[in-house]
Image (tube, rainbow, N blue to C red):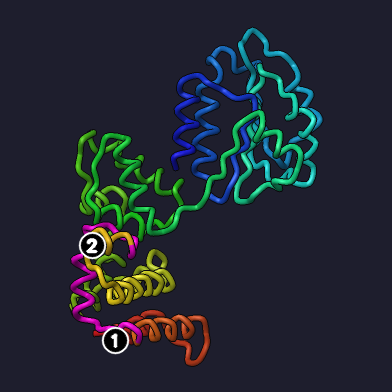
């Protein structure tokens, strides 16, 4: 997220604003920036008297404003961080007067998670005018592998595309959760390492052979034996491989095959941009498109929808494993 990177750059360079409003559905950047401000704003010896961290449920805005108006003690500045500030949504406009004329020696940080503040409010407009406002948006699922690759490159690592997709499909789109798992790799692997699916299996605990990524590949290749082995593994580890996730990934896969059929230009850049995938996986889609003509793709999408409804109890409900086996028989 370029805006977050620019804010982080300014903070690392010692350039602080008196007001920060960090909000949005993706908590990762909110936490990362508030933690960075906390680490950089004050010297260690100044924190005892000049750093206040409160939570929205416990915060009293009158006290916060009163503290913000005070001068720091034996320090250039003071820092006030309000975490979970979304719990103050009904009274947060009480900050409007202070935000209109903030103290330059105070850094006031609002961490407003999982929601959007009312942009019509006076305090919001003052934060925009006199400080920094960041909206931390959720990344689309197809952007997660690229985020993982960039995150690790910043740490001095390379990662194979299939490894980043394996992490994405196994851990979902929670960036904070993914970052914590990446920290495990940083502990055990020296900088400069090219991270492979073997590393992911060994240090994060995601099987490199039995996962949705390999299931999708087996379906695309028409490898029924491999596909059934993976499904059997899923049935024995259903908590880590929920049915709805498998159906969702297969639905995306067949949607991409349909999009590939609809393209008149099959240049790798065009395919990658339209399908939202790494060029590394174009060969996989091309091979699957040869096996599944448009009519079969349409039928597969219909079957996936039907099985999803059955899993939810519509029609003839059945065990998820049996539903997946039923799907594979139809596909392969």
Q: Is mark 2 on a helix, strand or loop?
A: helix
Q: How many other residues sit within 10 Å of disc 1, few (<14), some (14-19) or many (≥20)?
A: some
User: Which residue is pictured at 40% across the width and 48% down the height?
Assistant: 178
User: Badges 1 and 2: C-beta atoms under 8 Å apart?
Assistant: no
Residue 282 lies in the magenta stretch: yes
Residue 119 lies in the magenta stretch: no
User: Magenta segment, which residues?
Assistant: 274-298
User: Which residue is pictured at 50% across the width and 31% down the height?
Assistant: 7
**Number of numbered markers:** 2
Q: Which of 140 and 51 is in front in this view?
A: 140
* Label disc, if present, on residue 281 of the rendered structure: 2
Q: Which residue lies furthest to the top in this view?
A: 74
Q: Quadrant of the N terminus?
A: top left
Q: In which quarter of the image is the C terminus?
A: bottom left
Q: Which residue lies furthest to the front in this view?
A: 264
User: Which residue is pictured at 67% across the width and 41% down the height?
Assistant: 85
Q: From the top left corner, tell me how far across and down residue 305 is, in percent.
A: 44, 82
| Residue bearing the label numbered 1 | 296
Q: Disc 1 to disc 2, how far (Cα)? A: 21 Å
Q: What element carries label 1?
A: helix
Mark 1 vs 2, N-terminal side: 2
Q: From the top left corner, tell me how far across and down residue 35 is, in percent.
A: 52, 31
Q: From the top left corner, tell me how far across and down residue 93 is, in percent.
A: 78, 39
User: Which residue is pictured at 47% across the width and 92% down the height?
Assistant: 316
Position of residue 42 relative to residue 254, above or below, is above
Prevailing SS of the magenta stretch: helix
């Amino acid at each position: 997220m370029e805006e977050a990177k620019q804010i982080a750059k300014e903070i690392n360079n010692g350039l602080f604003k008196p007001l920060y409003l960090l909000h949005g559905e993706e908590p990762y950047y909110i936490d990362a920036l508030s933690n960075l401000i906390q680490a950089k704003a004050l010297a260690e010896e100044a924190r005892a008297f000049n750093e206040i961290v409160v939570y929205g449920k416990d915060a009293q805005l009158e006290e916060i404003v009163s503290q913000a108006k005070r001068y720091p003690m034996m320090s250039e500045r003071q820092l006030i961080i309000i975490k979970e500030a979304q719990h103050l949504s009904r009274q947060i406009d009480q900050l409007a007067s202070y935000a209109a004329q903030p103290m330059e020696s105070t850094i006031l940080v609002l961490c407003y998670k999982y929601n959007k503040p009312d942009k019509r409010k006076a305090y919001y407009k003052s934060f925009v005018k006199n400080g920094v406002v960041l909206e931390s948006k959720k990344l689309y699922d197809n952007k997660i592998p690229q985020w993982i690759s960039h995150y690790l490159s910043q740490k001095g690592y390379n990662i194979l595309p299939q490894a980043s997709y394996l992490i994405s499909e196994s851990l979902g789109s929670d960036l904070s959760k993914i970052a914590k798992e990446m920290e495990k790799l940083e502990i055990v692997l020296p900088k400069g390492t090219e991270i492979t699916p073997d590393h992911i299996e060994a240090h994060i605990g995601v099987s490199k052979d039995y996962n949705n990524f390999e299931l999708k590949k087996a379906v695309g290749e028409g490898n029924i034996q491999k596909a059934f082995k993976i499904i059997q593994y899923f049935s024995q580890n259903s908590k880590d491989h929920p049915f709805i996730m498998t159906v969702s990934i297969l639905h995306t896969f067949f949607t991409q095959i349909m999009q590939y059929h609809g393209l008149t230009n099959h240049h790798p850049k065009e395919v990658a941009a339209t399908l939202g995938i790494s060029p590394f996986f174009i060969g996989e889609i091309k091979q699957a498109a040869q096996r599944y003509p448009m009519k079969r793709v349409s039928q597969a999408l219909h079957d996936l929808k039907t099985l999803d409804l059955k899993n939810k109890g519509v029609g003839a409900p059945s065990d998820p494993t049996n539903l997946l086996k039923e799907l594979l028989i139809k596909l392969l």
